[in-house]
Amino acid sequence: MNLFTENIFMLLLELDNISSIFDQISAFISQLLENADALVFYSIGGNKGIPLIVLWLMTAGLFFTIRMQFINIRAFKHAIDVVLGKYDNPNDEGEVSHFQALATALSGTVGLGNIAGVAVAISLGGPGAAFWMTIAGLLGMTTKFVECTLAQKYRVLRLDGTIAGGPMYYLSIGFADLGLKKFGQILAVIFALFNILGVLGTSSIFQSNQSQVVVARVLPFFAEQSWIYGLIMVFIVGLVIIGGIQRIAGVAATIVPAMCGIYVFAALWVILANFTTIPGAFATIIQGAFAPQAMAGGFVGALIQGFRRATFSNEAGLGLAAIAHAAAKTDEPIREGIVALLEPFIDTVIISNMTALVVVITGAYNNPEFANIGGSELTLAAFSTVIPWFPSILAICVFLFAFSTIISSSYYGQVCWEYLFGNQNVIVYKLLFLMGIFVGAITNAEAVVKFSDSLKMTLALPSLLGAYFLCGKVATDLEKYMKRLQTGEMISVIKSL
């Protein structure tokens, strides 16, 4: 063996060793991420028990609903009036309207979970999961109210005229008012850091990846040329996020009504086509919600899956929507909180239930023909029983859902980045975010997405701690606000402008 051949041989051995080392590192990281996921979603009662994080969110929703005297019901009509612009004052500080703030927050929650996640919940927990999903959505309305009111109450006006708010600020500023400055700052940093990591993984990579898969089914070109899809998504997202919250909110205000309208229209088409089975479907859902069987489809299984799906869908308790609502034009924090309570209603009570009804009414969830499929494929199969060309509609919906979620999440991560590192190097964050979109389109970074999703759920810990500590101030402000609303004081003020 000559010297050249020997060197080549040694180099190949080194490469093989390096490859082995990378495999070991990859296996270690995967195991670490699995352990992190198991810790975050630790369940009481084993694999079929209730995850602690979901119990934490359920308890918060129930507590706040009672503490705020069912504001989710008694202020519902007022919330609609505010969104319709009846209380808008262009002279108020802020960057976006009430409707734009709502649309931005909705664009971050209405997404693939409403299509795939609901079908999974019904597959695992039975039709009764839809009932408990609805209950969780109604309770989540009050949680959103508290979070977004606090975001408005403790928001910061920057020197350049822009607004910054969210859990980071009501944790740091609000806790300082309570004499717990250090504790609040620690919680604020944890929230901001975990949200950045979660956004870079879950929102950019996951949304891009899943939308590419669905779109490629309708347009096979993108199945083999996924990098082109990635570049297209990066380009259009980049055009939007470079304009900040005002452009994001403007785009969201256009996209959200359209994408929700398309999906709900298609769902109603399927439901009305099976009109005679509607009473039976509702009976099946109610019976399944309280079924005593000790199995996945029984009471406990239905409750767990329903609450878990609602939690993942509307994100009540995670504090993310509060970042968008902090930028709304208003001098009434309670008013913006009331607007925010519409989100879980639209996301979970309406849109997620549309999916649930379609899956139950068509019988897709227990059809042996669909026994080996789940998620978006099960939803697609259910819709296709009535609308054969539904895959094309689904591809449009999924693209819009993914795109809207990406642009709103980018803003959430950006505000957290600026809280930690200032706005001088925010371009670094935007480049990382856009890079994640491209990576998601061409790969399936499952471990990263799973870990990011775990980080995202842990946001509920600091966010809700802040809400618990500060909810007394919200309750006091709410009582004063409702008295002024009932006496007509607010209407007279608006008319005088």
Image (spheres, helix red, strand yellow):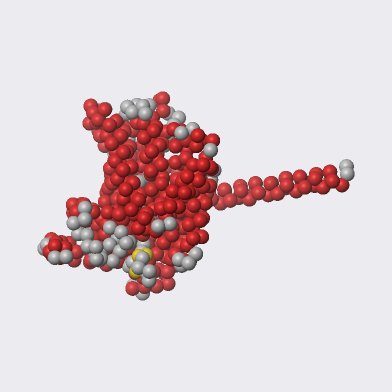
User: Residue 459 is drawn in which quadrant?
Assistant: bottom left
Look at 42% across and 55% down and name the residue there.
241
Q: Is residue 185 visible?
A: yes
Look at 51% across and 50% down and name the residue there.
436
- Quarter placement of the N terminus: top right
Q: Is 290 located above or below residue 318 in the figure?
A: above
Of all residues, the one furthest to the left in this rendering is 487
User: Residue 166 is drawn in which quadrant?
Assistant: bottom left
Residue 304 is situated, as x and y percent measured from the top left of the image, at: 36, 44
Residue 67 is situated, as x and y percent measured from the top left of the image, at: 25, 59
Using residue 20 as the reference point, say whether residue 433 is left or right of it. Answer: left
Look at 34% across and 72% down and name the residue there.
178
| Number of marks present in the image shown | 0
Look at 28% across and 36% down and name the residue there.
265
Using residue 487 as the reference point, say whether residue 447 is left or right of it. Answer: right
Residue 170 is situated, as x and y percent measured from the top left of the image, at: 35, 66
Q: Nearer the viewer, residue 219 or 211?
A: 219
Of all residues, the one furthest to the top in this rendering is 369
Residue 453 is situated, as x and y percent measured from the top left of the image, at: 46, 50
Q: Is residue 449 visible?
A: no
Q: Nearer the viewer, residue 360 or 156?
A: 156
Q: Is 365 located above or below residue 323 in the figure?
A: above
- Quarter placement of the C terminus: bottom left
Using residue 274 as the reference point, say whether residue 443 is left or right of it. Answer: right
Q: Is 435 located above or below residue 368 in the figure?
A: below
Q: Nearer the viewer, residue 232 or 447?
A: 232
User: Residue 89 is drawn in which quadrant?
Assistant: bottom left
Q: Nearer the viewer, residue 262 or 282?
A: 262
